[in-house]
């Protein structure tokens, strides 16, 4: 096959660029030239993750640190402020990002563009340049059923006119599935039918492809010393790289683990090597971020999914229906729920995650030409 020049566009957060690293490495392995772009300066993080070619607009600022930790936790439980934050991410930021990405496209001259499906500005820039683009989803949104209801779905329904206007301002139309824009040439979702298959709502668009997990690339993070564990079962609890400030949740979990004589690993904002840690734990308490769910499924680790906001309730529903975990409210769940989690058998989902989703995501890029 002809060697391609591929531009990959990511949002500047670990939860967004981590699942794209495997497909990037797979394209490079096949001999294609790959450049990774973002409209905020995450060049150091991308280089540390193994990306060799990076395109960031001159003068691009780093991602804001204003909404992290305790401040972000306040926003996430305040529906009007959360809706404003979502509007900034999916309306205002894409409007600002189109021209910088058009400049990157002119510089790189790619044959194909692969985008994080929340990077609306990248879809617009590719369409305006006449370059085919495919989607690499960093959530499970493209396989959410039409009748799904959640706070995020309601918020986006209210914003839909403005989202469409971002595209219409450039003479374009878009198809959305929750917060993701779908490519007519295909969108890869890093999951399997065992988690989100037809019995649970299924794939709702023929252009959406379940390719399996994306675990490649260098994720980095601290290695966790489990020397303190002894003979106890280990519960790992993490609520993501942004929404990690959850002191009440961690206190509740610590008390429950103490009563059951379980060891608790809780990074609370520190970046740990989750791929190295998960094979060594017996259960995972998570907010339901798509990466965390994907990685837990890949290692067959049963989950307690305690959503905080956005697409996390969708992930919780998929996990519970597939038998890979339990959806819980940590404010009201009984301590015994921990024991139930440890007894779950996730082998069927784990076996389905044995395939490499990076291959399917790379195939979409090759077929886009």
Image: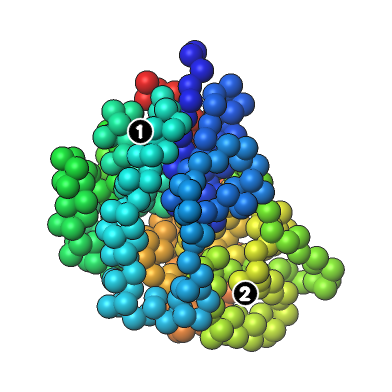
Is residue 155 something one can see in this rendering? Answer: yes
Is residue 180 rendered to the left or right of residue 357?
A: left
Is residue 201 something one can see in this rendering? Answer: no
Q: Which residue is mark 1?
A: 133
State whether residue 189 is above or below residue 238.
above
Q: Which residue is mark 2?
A: 268
User: Where is residue 139 drawn, in percent x and y?
Assistant: 42, 52
User: Where is residue 320 drawn, in percent x and y?
Assistant: 44, 61
User: Where is residue 230 drawn, in percent x and y?
Assistant: 84, 71
Residue at image point 61% right, 71% down: 269
Residue at image point 42% right, 27% down: 109
Quadrant of the image containing the C terminus = top left
State whether residue 159 is above or below residue 269.
above
Q: Nearer the viewer, mark 1 or mark 2?
A: 1
Disc number at residue 141? none
State whether residue 364 is above or below residue 120.
above
């Amino acid at each position: 096959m002809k060697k391609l020049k591929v531009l990959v566009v990511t949002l500047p957060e670990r939860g967004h660029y981590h699942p794209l690293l495997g497909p990037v490495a797979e394209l490079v392995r096949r001999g294609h030239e790959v450049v990774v772009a973002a409209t905020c300066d995450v060049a150091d993080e991308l280089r540390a993750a193994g990306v060799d070619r990076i395109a960031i607009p001159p003068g691009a600022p780093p991602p804001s640190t204003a909404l992290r930790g305790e401040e972000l936790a306040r926003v996430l439980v305040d529906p009007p402020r959360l809706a404003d934050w979502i509007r900034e991410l999916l309306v205002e930021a894409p409007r600002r990002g189109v021209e910088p990405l058009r400049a990157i496209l002119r510089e790189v001259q790619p044959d194909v563009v692969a985008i994080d499906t929340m990077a609306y500005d990248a879809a617009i820039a590719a369409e305006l340049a006449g370059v085919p683009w495919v989607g690499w989803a960093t959530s499970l949104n493209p396989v959410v059923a039409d009748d799904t209801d959640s706070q995020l779905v309601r918020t986006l329904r209210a914003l839909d006119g403005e989202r469409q206007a971002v595209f219409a301002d450039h003479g374009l139309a878009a198809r959305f599935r929750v917060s993701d824009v779908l490519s007519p040439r295909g969108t890869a979702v890093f999951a399997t039918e065992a988690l989100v298959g037809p019995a649970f709502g299924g794939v709702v668009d023929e252009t959406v492809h379940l390719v399996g997990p994306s675990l490649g690339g260098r994720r980095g993070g601290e290695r966790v010393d489990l020397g303190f564990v002894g003979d106890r079962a280990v519960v790992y609890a993490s609520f993501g790289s942004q929404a990690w400030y959850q002191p009440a949740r961690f206190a509740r979990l610590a008390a429950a683990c103490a009563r059951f004589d379980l060891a608790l690993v809780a990074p609370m904002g520190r970046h740990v090597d989750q791929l190295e840690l998960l094979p060594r734990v017996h259960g995972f308490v998570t907010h339901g971020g798509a990466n965390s769910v994907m990685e837990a499924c890949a290692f067959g680790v049963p989950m307690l999914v305690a959503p905080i906001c956005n697409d996390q309730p969708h992930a919780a529903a998929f996990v519970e229906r597939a038998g890979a975990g339990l959806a819980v409210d940590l404010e009201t769940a009984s301590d015994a729920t921990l024991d139930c989690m440890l007894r779950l058998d996730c082998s069927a989902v784990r076996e389905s995650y044995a395939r490499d989703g990076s291959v399917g995501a790379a195939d979409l890029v090759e077929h886009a030409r």
